[in-house]
Amino acid sequence: MTSYFATILRSISNYNRLENVNRTLTMQLSTGKKINSPSDNPFLYRKIQSYEAESAAYESYLDRIDEGAAVVSVVSDAASLQLDTLEKMLEIANQVRAGGLSTGERTALNEQYEKLTEELNEISANAGFDGKSYLDGTYANSGSGFKVATGPGESYEFLFINATAGSGGLDVESTSVSSVPNANAAVAKLEAAVETLNGFQQRLGTGEFILESRAGLMESKQRELDELVENYQEVDPVRLSAELERNRVLQQYALAAIGSVFASQQNLLDYLFPR
């Protein structure tokens, strides 16, 4: 009887052990991960959690860099439009300063010139999001510029110039081409404004390059962490499925062994105590 009892306990123990293993294998197959809870492997679970949190932080920085790049793109496009506008104003001013125009012609050209000046302000006012204007001088000074978080403890600051047409900005609002002398004075200020915007565009380009470089660094670090997690978590579905099937067969054997013991014991009882 003792031998029968030991065999039954051993078979039940094997069955339960295989059942626990099968639960783990089933979870791994359904999630595609080796480690799904601290009970699977406390040390690796904490390490994987740490890697995933760090990777998520890098993803957050990448999002901020993308948002910053979008703002810079809007500002750069606005500066390009303003350069085009200034070039048109220069053409008009040079046409007037060349002389040979009637009063009516100069008046008509001056009206076009004034509309282009208004256009400069409109472009500046529209270079922003959610009520913000990035070319009104708000972000023109160091310390109060447009900052983009680019990594842990790192940021890049863009200084957006005041690109309004007034004296605090491009300083062309008070110019006119109503006469040759006025046109001569306007050309000097227009050329200075063009130089200012060209320099600004170059600095924006440098900033965009820095953002791209730092984004590449964040992506590289994130990729390294994701690869580490993948190495820890990677499962072989074919092998797991085969192991799960093998364990189920072994469970059937364990059940069969238990049934066989009970059957043998019943046969012995029937032999010793026939009915």
Image: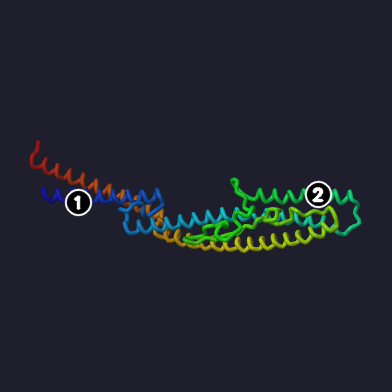
Decide if residue 54 is on the left or right side of residue 175: left
Image coordinates of residue 34 in percent, x first then y, are: 37, 55
| Disc on the earlier residue, 2 or 1 | 1
Q: So how many labels did they put on this image?
A: 2
- Quarter of image, res 79: bottom right
- Residue 262 can be seen, yes or no: yes
Which one is in front, 246 or 102? 102
- Residue 223 can be seen, yes or no: no
SS at mark 1? helix
Task: Say which amino acid is labelled 1.
Answer: Arg
- Quarter of image, res 172: bottom right
Mark 2 Cα-neighbour bin, 10 Å: few <14, some 14–19, many ≥20: some
**Mark 2 lies on residue:** 112
Image coordinates of residue 36 in percent, x first then y, are: 36, 52
Residue drawn at the location 49% of the way across and 60% of the way down: 151
Name of the residue lying farthest toward the left: 273
Residue drawn at the location 11% of the way across and 50% of the way down: 2
Image coordinates of residue 253 in percent, x first then y, are: 26, 49
Disc 2 versus disc 1: nearer the observer: 2
